[in-house]
Image: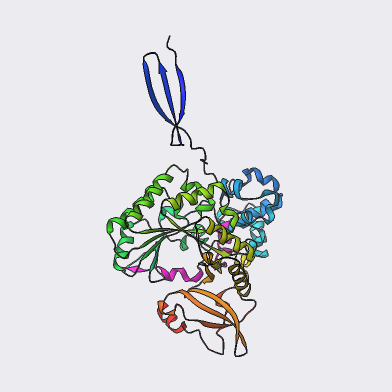
């Protein structure tokens, strides 16, 4: 009878066990891969299954029904990481991550909420429900900042998966990346998930490359969505290899706009193809092209979980630059100490603070908006609380149709109180860096509500802007 002894060896590679099996005739070694210790299986929650979340026991039936009503109009999806690792369920009603993921009753006007609630209670057929829901959606400004005008025509064809608003940067919407691990309730691209006529997507890498070659002033390609990080690495490789093989000398930066760093950090740590993705980023870096992750980080608590910290470390070690941006949001981060803490936490982990945005005029803007005057005050106060190394952040910035307009101050000139404004980016690069003035409006929450100061009929750029659009 053969006698076996089993010895488990922990090698340098912490993700595999190695077994030594010895019997009287000799020895041999076999490798047996086991599950990574920190691996987590992704589980999404939507209207169809959110009631299965164990923590739903903390919500009243009225609150759960409210999620169903608002989630019928505005896209709703979250995941098990957000539910289990980010939300404080003992105080969920005021928890920023609960509000960031779960639709709130106040995100719809009372009449619209009552209309959808009535339809749900009556079990109206799907076709009739969608017809009424679309009417509500169309009132929520589904095309903010005239995004449609950013879609270029090239060789007689409209490139619906590309946007080119600013001279140096091209946005690319890969077809496989037009969803997210979880949806933000403030998302200005909510129509991307809810209205077919406002979707942007393209899977043809050759068209992207051809357009890029023809526009030699483009230095940056931004992969956006949705969230490109939902893509499998093989799709990233398809697009990145096309760019590398094209050998485009003016391409200097590849950016990836994503929330996955804090909504599903396992994308960069323990997902089955996480290592391959980091190797791909390294390959791009070796070709002399910078890889920048444009991370949406709304609150410092997002960066404090072990999974998020590990993801940040792995990306930085792979040579990826991480920049952080977020809108200023009522109920989430509308206090200067939260912003100062966010920037400090980012810098401590090697992330570059990049933008403070004003919540766009779309979707649930009424729920999230703060006045422009208060936005500037919060920015100024937060900015004064951090050292120079965190003062890379620009804001408050409004991504409106003419460009990114920054509120640089509130002052009084010739007896008139004014907002001091500046283009950080513009459809015409010559607009950038020219201060201009708007009459002070204590109630304004978006650029379109502002009027030129000093009796001027128009802002300085308006004539050329309208000619450009025409």
Residue under the point 42% across and 23% down: 20
Foreground of the two, 112 or 388: 388
Q: Magenta-highlighted stretch: main secondary structure?
A: helix
Is 169 displayed left or right of 409 in the figure? left
Q: Which residues are magenta?
A: 129-154
Foreground of the two, 219 or 97: 219
Image quadrant in which you'd find residue 141: bottom right
Q: Is residue 155 visible in this depiction of the protein? A: no
User: Which percent across, then down, holds residue 459?
Assistant: 50, 84
| Magenta region includes residue 151 | yes
Is 43 displayed left or right of 201 in the figure? right
Count of numbered labels shown in the rendering: 0
In the image, residue 165 above or below residue 452: above
Foreground of the two, 288 or 32: 288
Residue under the point 42% across and 55% down: 320
Is 100 displayed left or right of 234 in the figure? right
Foreground of the two, 321 or 270: 321
Q: Quadrant of the N terminus?
A: top left
User: Which percent across, then down, holds residue 367?
Assistant: 64, 65
Is 244 displayed left or right of 62 in the figure? left
Q: Is residue 12 visible in this depiction of the protein? A: yes
User: Which percent across, then down, holds residue 50?
Assistant: 61, 47
User: Which percent across, then down, holds residue 365?
Assistant: 60, 66
| Magenta region includes residue 464 | no
Image quadrant in which you'd find residue 32: top left
- Residue farthest toward the top in the current orientation of the protein: 1
Q: How is the image coloured?
A: rainbow
In the image, residue 355 above or below residue 428: above
Q: Quadrant of the C terminus?
A: bottom left
Residue under the point 46% across and 68% down: 147
In the image, residue 373 above or below residue 247: below
Residue under the point 35% across and 59% down: 289
């Amino acid at each position: 009878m053969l006698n076996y002894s089993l010895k488990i060896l922990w090698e340098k590679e912490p993700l595999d066990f190695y077994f030594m099996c010895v019997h009287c005739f000799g020895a041999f070694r076999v490798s047996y891969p086991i599950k990574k210790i920190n691996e987590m299986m992704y589980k999404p929650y939507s209207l169809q299954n959110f009631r299965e979340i164990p923590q739903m026991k903390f919500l009243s039936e009225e609150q759960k029904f409210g999620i169903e009503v608002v989630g019928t109009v505005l896209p709703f999806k979250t995941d098990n990481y957000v539910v289990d690792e980010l939300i404080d369920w003992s105080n969920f009603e005021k928890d920023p991550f609960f509000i960031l993921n779960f639709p709130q009753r106040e995100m719809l006007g009372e009449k619209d909420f009552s209309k959808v609630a009535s339809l749900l209670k009556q079990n109206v057929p799907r076709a009739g429900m969608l017809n009424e829901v679309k009417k509500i959606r169309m009132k929520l400004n589904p095309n903010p900042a005239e995004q449609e005008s950013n879609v270029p025509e090239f060789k007689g064809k409209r490139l619906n998966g590309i946007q080119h608003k600013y001279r140096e940067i091209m946005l690319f919407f890969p077809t496989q990346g037009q969803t997210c691990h979880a949806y933000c309730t403030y998302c200005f691209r909510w129509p991307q998930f809810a209205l077919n006529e406002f979707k942007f997507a393209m899977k043809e890498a050759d068209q992207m490359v051809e357009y890029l070659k023809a526009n030699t002033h483009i230095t940056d390609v931004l992969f956006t969505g949705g969230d490109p990080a939902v893509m499998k690495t093989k799709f990233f490789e398809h697009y990145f290899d096309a760019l590398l093989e094209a050998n485009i000398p003016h391409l200097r930066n590849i950016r990836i706009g994503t929330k996955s760093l804090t909504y599903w950090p396992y994308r960069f740590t323990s997902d089955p193809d996480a290592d391959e993705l980091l190797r791909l980023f390294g390959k791009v870096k070796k070709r002399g092209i910078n890889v920048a992750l444009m991370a949406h980080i709304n609150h410092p608590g997002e960066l404090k979980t072990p999974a998020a910290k590990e993801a940040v470390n792995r990306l930085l070690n792979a040579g990826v630059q991480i920049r952080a941006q977020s809108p200023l949001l009522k109920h989430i981060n509308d206090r200067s100490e939260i912003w100062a803490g966010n920037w400090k936490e980012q810098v401590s982990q090697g992330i570059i603070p990049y933008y403070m945005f004003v919540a766009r005029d779309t979707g649930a803007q009424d729920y999230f908006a703060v006045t422009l005057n208060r936005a500037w005050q919060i920015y100024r106060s937060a900015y004064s609380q951090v050292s120079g190394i965190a003062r890379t952040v620009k804001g408050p910035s409004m991504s409106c149709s003419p460009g990114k307009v920054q509120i640089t101050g509130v002052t009084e000139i010739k007896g008139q109180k004014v907002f001091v404004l500046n283009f950080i980016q513009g459809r015409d690069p010559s607009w950038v860096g020219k201060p201009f003035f708007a009459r002070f409006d204590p109630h304004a929450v978006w650029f379109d509500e502002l009027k030129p100061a000093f009796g001027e009929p128009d802002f300085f750029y308006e004539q050329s802007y309208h000619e450009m659009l025409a």
